[in-house]
């Protein structure tokens, strides 16, 4: 059974989705690949206390590593990519090519990018930490300005 809640953040409204009480989605307003609202289930704030506490601590600069139980729905390849994302340390970045190489297929940069774009739990599964081979900001489901702000925040250079 799915439930959802909506919280405010420095990056706009975030919709959290749980499947049987386990976080399975975190979506930004106007996010690319955001599932239809009707798939999120009834609004119920109860399953999200720990997720909200950890997100608030992250946004306050007090938390660098999330310790939430997650339910990531995707193909085996997508889940492998998302596991790699969770291994990128706070404040650091990796290129799509580096992630592909870590998965044992250096030619899979494009596939890694597609999987990265379908990440269902933004911020917590830090797809914003993936950049182009040249160091440029490329693709982000929540929009490049948000990606840049998240990276600046984690590097301690944000101005908000």
Image (cartoon, grey):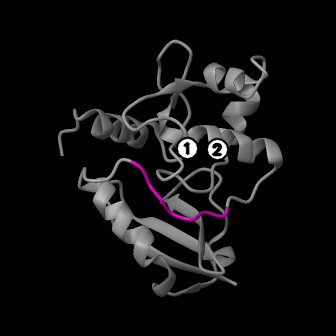
Element at badge 2? helix
Residue found 53% across the figure and 60% down from its top:
27
Q: CA distance from mark 2 to mark 1?
A: 5 Å
Residue found 18% across the figure and 39% down from its top:
159
Q: For residue 35, which numbered disc appears in the image?
A: none
Figure quadrant of residue 80: top right
> Could you tell whether 43 is left or right of 37 in the image?
left
Q: Main secondary structure of the magenta part?
A: loop
- Percent from the top left, x then y, of residue 99? 64, 27
Question: Over which residues does the magenta segment extend?
Answer: 65-71
> Could you tell whether 13 is left or right of 110 in the image?
left
Q: Residues within 10 Å of mark 2 (few under 14, many from 20)?
A: some
Residue found 79% across the figure and 41% down from its top:
77
Q: Determine contact: label 2, label 1, CB under 8 Å.
A: yes
Which residue in the protein does label 1 denote?
86
For this rendering, which residue is in front, 72 or 37? 72
Which residue in the protein does label 2 denote?
83
């Amino acid at each position: 059974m799915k439930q959802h809640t909506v919280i405010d953040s420095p990056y706009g409204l975030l919709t959290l989705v749980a499947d049987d009480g386990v976080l399975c989605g975190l979506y930004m307003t106007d996010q690319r690949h955001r599932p239809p609202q009707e798939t999120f289930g009834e609004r119920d704030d109860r399953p999200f206390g720990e997720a909200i506490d950890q997100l608030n601590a992250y946004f306050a600069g007090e938390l660098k590593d999330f310790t939430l139980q997650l339910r990531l729905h995707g193909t085996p390849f997508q889940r492998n990519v998302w596991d790699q994302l969770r291994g990128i340390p706070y404040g650091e970045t990796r290129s799509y090519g580096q992630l592909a190489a870590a998965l044992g297929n250096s030619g899979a940069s494009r596939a890694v990018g597609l999987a990265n774009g379908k990440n269902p739990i933004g911020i917590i599964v830090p797809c914003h930490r993936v950049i182009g081979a040249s160091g440029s900001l490329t693709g982000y489901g929540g929009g490049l300005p948000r990606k840049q702000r998240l990276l600046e925040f984690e590097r301690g250079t944000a101005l908000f």
